[in-house]
Image (cartoon, helix red, strand yellow):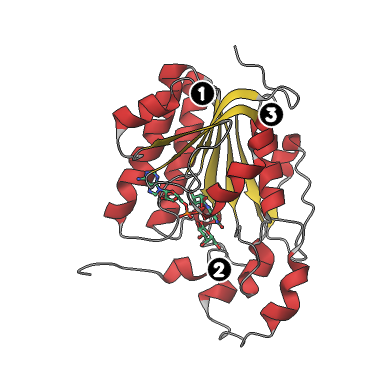
């Protein structure tokens, strides 16, 4: 039985989406928490596997491949998938089938802890002048947001039914810098993201916990008191980017970027023949 303690690194920790923007960062920052990091993505990654790493390239939509991927790991940091709004058909395999495959494999192989990269887009239709906590009814703003909302439901189900614990991080905007006015409020630094994942991996008895992923920014839309057991204490703030961002032209007052928590996602699509 795996013991979850901040002082006992995992033997094998799986990181999906390891070739992505956040995956590249987490490949380094999660290093202290496992003897071996198993890195996975659908695309090859550079550099190739180094010391204490192993790489398995596979498609989250491929159930058998994900079953093999999860075999032998102690915990999963699930960051793989489509990370922006796309036609539903492009999201279905990686995000919706993908998260089901991850949890089915976890169940089959006895993995008891997952940290899931959820998104602010599960609540994107709340307005920026509203403050919400994790109990707020979800208001997905996109097919992408719907897929993350489904992912949170899968996490909840697999806890209630099989005792697999998850911390779902509703990540705001995790990039090197806040790029616009909305991101001054949603920005999450890489160090604060790493802290959230560390708390998600090592805090005992999380059941299914939903936590909002934002740094210690000046303006707060998200109340994390329902996740206080994680003891997440953000250290960074987007104030360092304010002057640069506020030098940008001011969008119209009704621009979704300034109105909705999900910003432009609320107005993306429809796609294809519609
Ligand atoms: P990204 O798009 O750079 O990385 C996602 C990775 O998933 C890519 O390397 C991609 O190749 C991989 N992937 C896509 N389809 C796949 C499939 N079928 N099978 C296996 N791997 C597949 O995105 P980023 O920014 O690194 O985000 C990582 C995770 O965090 C994503 O799940 C995203 O939805 C979530 N997130 C990120 C936020 C951010 O601000 N960066 C905000 C909210 C959520
Ligand atoms: C997300 O969920 C996306 O993965 C990321 O690319 C950003 O768009 C972010 O949300 C955001 O809302 O800024």
One can see residue 135 in this view: no
Query: Is disc 1 placed on a helix, strand or loop?
Result: loop
How many numbered circles does the render carry?
3
Q: Position of residue 27 (x, y in %)?
A: 58, 43
In the picture, measured across the screen, residue 162 lies left or right of residue 178, that is left
Residue linked to disc 1 = 73
Q: Earlier in the sequence, mark 1 or mark 2?
A: 1
Residue 210 point in image, percent of width and height: 61, 41
Task: Give yes or no for contact between labels 3 and 1 (Cβ–Cβ under 8 Å).
Answer: no
Q: Earlier in the sequence, mark 3 or mark 1?
A: 1
Cβ at disc 2 under 8 Å from ligand 2: no
Quadrant, the C terminus: bottom left
Residue receiving disc 2:
260
Q: CA distance from mark 2 to mark 3?
A: 33 Å
Q: Quadrant of residue 42?
A: top left
Give the side of residue 242 with respect to residue 266, left or right.
right
The answer to whether any part of residue 258 appears in the image is: yes
Q: Label 3, label 1: how many angstroms apart (C-alpha)?
A: 15 Å
Q: Is residue 118 left or right of residue 243?
A: left
Q: Which residue is mark 3?
A: 202
Image point (68%, 60%), residue name:
221
What is the x, y in percent for residue 194? 67, 44
**Considering the numbered disc 3 on the image, is that residue within a helix, a strand or a loop?**
helix
Single out the mark in the foreground, 2 or 3.
3
**At numbered mark 2, what does the secondary structure look like: helix, strand or loop?**
loop
């Amino acid at each position: 039985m795996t013991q979850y303690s901040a002082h006992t690194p995992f033997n094998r920790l799986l990181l999906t989406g390891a070739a992505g923007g956040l995956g590249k960062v987490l490949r380094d920052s999660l290093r202290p928490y496992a003897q071996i990091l198993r890195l996975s993505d659908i695309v090859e990654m550079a550099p190739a596997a180094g010391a204490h790493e192993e790489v398995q390239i596979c498609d989250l939509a491929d159930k058998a491949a994900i079953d093999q991927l999860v075999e032998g790991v102690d915990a999963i940091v699930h960051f793989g998938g489509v990370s922006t709004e796309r036609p539903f058909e492009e999201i279905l395999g990686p995000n919706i089938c993908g998260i089901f495959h991850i949890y089915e494999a976890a169940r089959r192989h006895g993995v008891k802890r997952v940290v899931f990269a959820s998104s602010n887009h599960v609540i994107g239709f709340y307005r920026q002048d509203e403050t919400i906590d994790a109990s707020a009814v979800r208001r997905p703003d996109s097919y992408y947001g719907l897929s993350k909302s489904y992912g949170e439901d899968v996490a909840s189900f697999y806890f209630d039914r099989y005792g697999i614990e998850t911390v779902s991080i509703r990540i705001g905007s995790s990039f090197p810098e806040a790029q616009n006015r909305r991101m001054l409020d949603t920005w999450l630094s890489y160090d604060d993201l790493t802290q959230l994942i560390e708390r998600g991996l090592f805090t005992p008895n999380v059941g299914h916990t939903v936590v909002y992923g934002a740094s210690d920014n000046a303006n707060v839309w998200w109340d994390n008191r329902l996740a206080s057991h994680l003891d997440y204490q953000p250290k960074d703030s987007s104030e360092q980017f304010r002057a640069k961002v506020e030098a940008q032209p001011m969008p119209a007052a009704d621009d979704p970027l300034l109105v909705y928590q999900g910003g432009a996602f609320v107005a993306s699509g429809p796609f294809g023949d519609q």
